[in-house]
């Protein structure tokens, strides 16, 4: 498409100025005034020339002698010079129409080329914007929580949490059962959000590390730690495709850990890498038995909690 | 040869005529689509800043902080100072879906040592005649104002009915990254329900 656009641009580079000038002359008031003034100037020059010519002819002839032109002659010359061009146009009508048609075709072709160019440019812009929307609107599933039992006597909630390392596979990587006091359950995580520019381009993915669960009656420092690591001790978030995580190599575990640590602890590096914020983030809800809740990280920033429908 | 040139010219003319006839409606549709996509992007990137805070002091077991509630134009609605037991400070929001977007209402402040049920209720601090002043703006219509009052009433009751809703708390991380005294932090809320803390 780039080539097509370039060819169209090259074809139109000389047509467009001519077309624009013609449209300016015919299509704008200033252009029409210029056309009228040109005609008036042509008429004045022709008329003056005719009058002078007649005078000089008179001076050279013996009949009139003085070169004086009577008023009726001037009126005659005035109308002759005024209607002469119109008569000439009528006489040469086929040629004039041919020229006008050619100019019309030139303008039409130029307009069509411009329209086509604009169409391709808009198409490209739509593709770019659609990609930006796709990247910004993306979210990754972090965990799903199934509420197995709510005990109103002992004031406890039992749940099973499934952790997801890769949203593309939609399969849980690890499970953990939790029993906690309370019904309003907080799922706490560390969240690292990148700037919109990196997200929109699709080369950065916000990172999340779930690390504890607490509730409305259990303070965070007494919460239950989450086992959000794979069998190889690698946080599941790193098990995404390499292309989905910025700056983290697929194979080098040490490099992954140091990269994440550096993004958190090295302020300058984080700024350079486009980290917008790093924070603790706990989403919560008063849960109901049998329901499944999903925790997602949004590419626009932060965690959200969704309740899924159970059929 | 002449015939080929003539046919080429006729093809060019017909193509130009067709393009000029069809293109304006195509371009209009494309421009409409571009405008829609730009609106979607603008909406996805839309942020509101209902709250700013500063840490005024810390001990091993307490955090002193000041909160400012801000309206949609960034004007101060109210201020609040408090000290709380703990080492991590949590700002809890009540997120309710209204239309396609989430609205976030500051709900309470608690800490890692103070459970959410024992936290400080923030809602009365930015409420005026039942209206959540963080959503006050110059251009707000009476209809929107009324619907926000109704919505806020459900938020205060702790249940926004059938609307999609969840709580969302943001906090610092003891031993990793804590809020530093003297720095102003702003909490920004996103239309998709996410919440972030950024340094001002």
Image (cartoon, coloured by chain):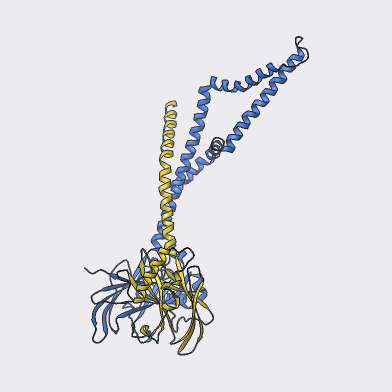
Chain colours: A blue, B yellow
Front-most of residues A295 and B120: B120
Picture residue at 53% right of the left edge, 25% below the top: A96
Name the quarter where the C terminus of chain A is drawn. Answer: bottom left
Looking at the image, the residue that sits furthest to the left is A311
The x and y percentages for residue A8 are 48, 43
Q: Quadrant of residue B112?
A: bottom left
Looking at the image, the residue that sits furthest to the bottom is B60
Looking at the image, the residue that sits furthest to the front is B129
Picture residue at 37% right of the left edge, 83% below the top: B116
The x and y percentages for residue A148 are 23, 78
Q: Is residue B58 above or below residue B45?
A: below
* A247 left or right, relative to A168: right
The x and y percentages for residue A228 are 33, 78
* A48 left or right, relative to B167: right
The x and y percentages for residue A162 are 29, 75
Picture residue at 69% right of the left edge, 20% below the top: A50
Residue A278 seen: yes
Instruction: State how many labels appear.
Output: 0
Residue A299 seen: no
Looking at the image, the residue that sits furthest to the top is A63
Picture residue at 46% right of the left edge, 43% below the top: A115
Front-most of residues B55 and A158: B55
Front-most of residues A229 and A31: A31
* A36 left or right, relative to B36: right
Q: Is residue A285 above or below residue A30?
A: below
């Amino acid at each position: 498409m780039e080539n097509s656009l370039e060819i169209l641009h090259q074809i139109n580079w000389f047509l467009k100025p001519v077309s624009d000038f013609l449209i300016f002359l015919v299509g704008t008031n200033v252009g029409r005034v210029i056309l009228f003034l040109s005609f008036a100037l042509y008429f004045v020059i022709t008329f003056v020339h005719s009058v002078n010519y007649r005078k000089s002819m008179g001076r050279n002839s013996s009949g009139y002698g003085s070169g004086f032109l009577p008023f009726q002659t001037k009126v005659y010359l005035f109308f002759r010079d005024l209607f002469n061009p119109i008569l000439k146009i009528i006489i040469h009508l086929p040629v004039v129409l041919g020229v006008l048609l050619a100019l019309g075709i030139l303008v039409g072709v130029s307009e069509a080329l411009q329209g086509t160019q604009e169409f391709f440019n808009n198409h490209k812009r739509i593709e770019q914007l659609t990609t930006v929307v796709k990247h910004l609107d993306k979210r990754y599933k972090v965990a799903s929580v199934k509420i197995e039992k709510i005990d109103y006597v002992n004031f406890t909630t039992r749940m099973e949490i499934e952790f997801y390392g890769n949203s593309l596979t939609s399969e849980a990587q690890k499970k953990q059962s939790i029993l906690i006091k309370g019904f309003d359950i907080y799922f706490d995580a560390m969240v690292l959000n990148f700037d919109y520019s990196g997200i929109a381009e699709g080369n950065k993915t916000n990172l999340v590390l779930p690390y504890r669960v607490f509730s409305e009656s259990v303070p965070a420092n007494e919460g239950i730690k989450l086992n959000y690591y794979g069998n190889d001790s690698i946080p599941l978030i790193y098990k995404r495709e390499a292309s989905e995580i910025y700056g983290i190599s697929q194979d080098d575990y040490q490099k992954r850990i140091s990269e994440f640590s550096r993004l958190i602890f090295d302020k300058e590096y984080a700024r350079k890498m486009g980290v917008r914020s790093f924070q603790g983030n706990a989403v919560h809800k008063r849960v109901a038995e049998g329901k499944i809740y999903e925790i997602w990280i949004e590419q626009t920033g932060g965690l959200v909690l969704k309740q899924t429908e159970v059929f | 040869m002449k015939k080929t040139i003539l046919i080429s010219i006729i093809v060019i003319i017909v193509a130009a005529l067709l393009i000029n006839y069809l293109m304006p409606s195509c371009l209009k549709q494309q421009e409409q689509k571009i405008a829609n996509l730009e609106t979607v992007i603008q909406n996805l990137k839309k942020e509101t800043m209902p709250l700013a805070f500063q840490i005024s002091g810390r001990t091993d077991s307490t955090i002193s902080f000041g909160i400012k509630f801000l309206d949609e134009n960034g004007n101060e609605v109210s201020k609040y100072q408090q000290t709380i037991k703990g080492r991590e400070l949590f700002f809890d929001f009540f997120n309710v879906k209204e239309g396609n977007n989430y609205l976030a209402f500051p709900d309470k402040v608690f800490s890692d040592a103070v459970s959410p049920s024992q936290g400080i209720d923030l809602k009365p601090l930015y409420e005026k005649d039942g209206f959540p002043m963080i959503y006050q703006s110059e251009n707000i219509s009476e209809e929107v104002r009324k619907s926000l009052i109704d919505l806020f009433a459900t938020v205060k009751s702790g249940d926004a009915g059938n609307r999609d809703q969840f709580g969302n708390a943001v906090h610092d991380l003891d031993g990793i990254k804590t809020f530093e005294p003297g720095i102003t932090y702003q909490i920004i809320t996103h239309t998709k329900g996410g919440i972030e803390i950024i340094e001002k």
